Amino acid sequence: MDLLSFLLLLPILHLFFTIWKWVNDKRDQECYILDYQCYKPTDDRMCGTQFCGEVIKRNKNLGLNEYKFLLKAIVSSGIGEQTYAPRIMFSGREESPTLADGISEMDEFFYDSIGKLLSRAGISPQEIDLLVVNVSMLSTVPSLSSRIINHYKMRQDIKAFNLTGMGCSASLISLDIVRNVFKSYKNKYALLVTSESLSPNWYAGNDRSMILANCLFRSGGCAILLTNNKSLKHRAMFKLKCLVRTHHGARDESYDCCIQREDEKGRMGFHLGKSLPKAAIRSFVDNLRVISPKILPVRELLRFMVVSLVKKWNRHGSPKETTQGPIKSVVNFRTGVDHFCIHTGGKAVIDGIGINLDLTEYDLEPARMTLHRFGNTSANSLWYVLAYMEAKKRLNKGDRVLMISFGAGFKCNSCLWEVVRDLGDGNVWKDEIDRYPPKSLANPYMEKYGWIQNEDPSTFKIPEGLSLER
């Protein structure tokens, strides 16, 4: 009888063990952010209105029509006067960069932000188990990840990944790598390093689709420390809830709208095509279809389904002339999200997401202020937006933060974070958060260079030694 009872008990014990193991393994697969450090370059790299005008004047391939185009672009860009450029711009060598210029630009960021992050977290470089670096527009041999390993003398068994060509959505791609490695290894530390190298990528031609990138992109970077060690949960800032990646590279229109190429005269640059907004919206919608069920409450999903069915029924059942207008069927993302961390690709990008998600100016403020203060810093811009929220003491325990990014390919990536504890450190905004938001986001470009609009293309010429400013 005892033997029979034991044999009957074995399957039950095995079931309980299997459930316990699954739950325990699941807990070890969590992804936490312990700390992060955004990069603020030194003030001697700050590019104000007058300096930007002088840089544009140095390009001898530009004429009055290009000046007018650039003026219109920068005035409507949402970018202010305190953004940062690489040092090569201040020495006037942007048209003849060297490999050393690109590496030096990255070294400044690496040694500043990684050093501050590890020091503040009390973590030795030798404790890092996983290193993921993404810098899209600079590929070196050895890789930039190897350069970091060499400088900080990290362990020989460290798992290192170096991503290039992933564009402005690279941060969340790097995060996805960390998340997947964490599923296979317990109690690990990961260092995610995201930036962009502008030094070798200045466009010196006059193709409008390529000179636009010169106006939008600025220097920046961020280093993020992550772990899957559940015993460190009390120290964590954020917990990753889900991550969704959408890639439309199979569509020619999406692939070609945002691409590095040469112009007709062989000058390398970054082309931003007219189909870019359409490609961004298409990838954004597809991404939302996947992530919405993961982050929204059931009641909101049911409401959306009911309203959509009623709207569809009204359209089919009523003559067009008697239809009173569309029934609103937009999902209310605020039922599942408390804060929206939006890629600062430009004013139009922020406005577009705001309209599509029915967001308020309060929701969009962090992205607008980041664009104004730091510009489009590519893949790392998300972390400046997050730091703004933290500096404003918006992030409280239990809040949910949705990150949305876009990148060449064309890609749209998003993820949801849960705030683990109340946060209030200023990070890169510490010394200036009280000045934001300013009374006006208007930049002085039109005031200083608006006279160009009245010039005649047939007679226009900038005399030698004369500034663009009047």
Image: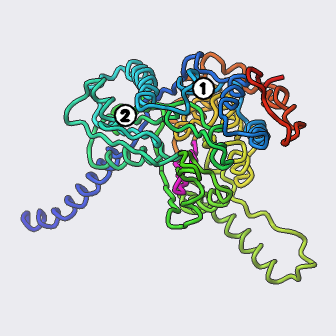
Q: Residue at point 75% right, 76% down?
A: 312
Query: Which amino acid type is shown beneath numbered disc 2?
Result: Leu
Position above or below: 134 against 11:
above
Position above or below: 366 against 153:
below
Position above or below: 204 against 17:
above
- The residue tagged with tag 2: helix, strand or loop? strand
Q: Main secondary structure of the magenta part?
A: strand
- The residue tagged with tag 1: helix, strand or loop? strand
* For residue 219, side relative to residue 10 (left or right): right
How far apart marks 2 and 1 lie (CA) works out to 24 Å
Point out the image quarter for the N terminus. Answer: bottom left
Per the rendering, the mark at residue 191 is 2
Q: Nearer the viewer, residue 35 or 337?
A: 35
Residue sitting at the far right = 322
The segment highlighted magenta reads 401-415
- Residue 28 place in picture, x, y as percent: 32, 44
Q: Quadrant of residue 126?
A: top left
- Residue 284 place in picture, x, y as percent: 61, 57
- Residue 414 place in picture, x, y as percent: 54, 50
Query: Which amino acid type is shown beneath numbered disc 1?
Result: Tyr
Q: Residue at point 57% right, 49% down?
A: 265
| Residue 410 located within the stretch drawn in magenta | yes
Residue indicated by mark 1: 84
Numbered marks: total: 2
- Residue 343 place in picture, x, y as percent: 60, 43
Q: Is residue 230 visible?
A: no
Q: Nearer the viewer, mark 2 or mark 1?
A: 1
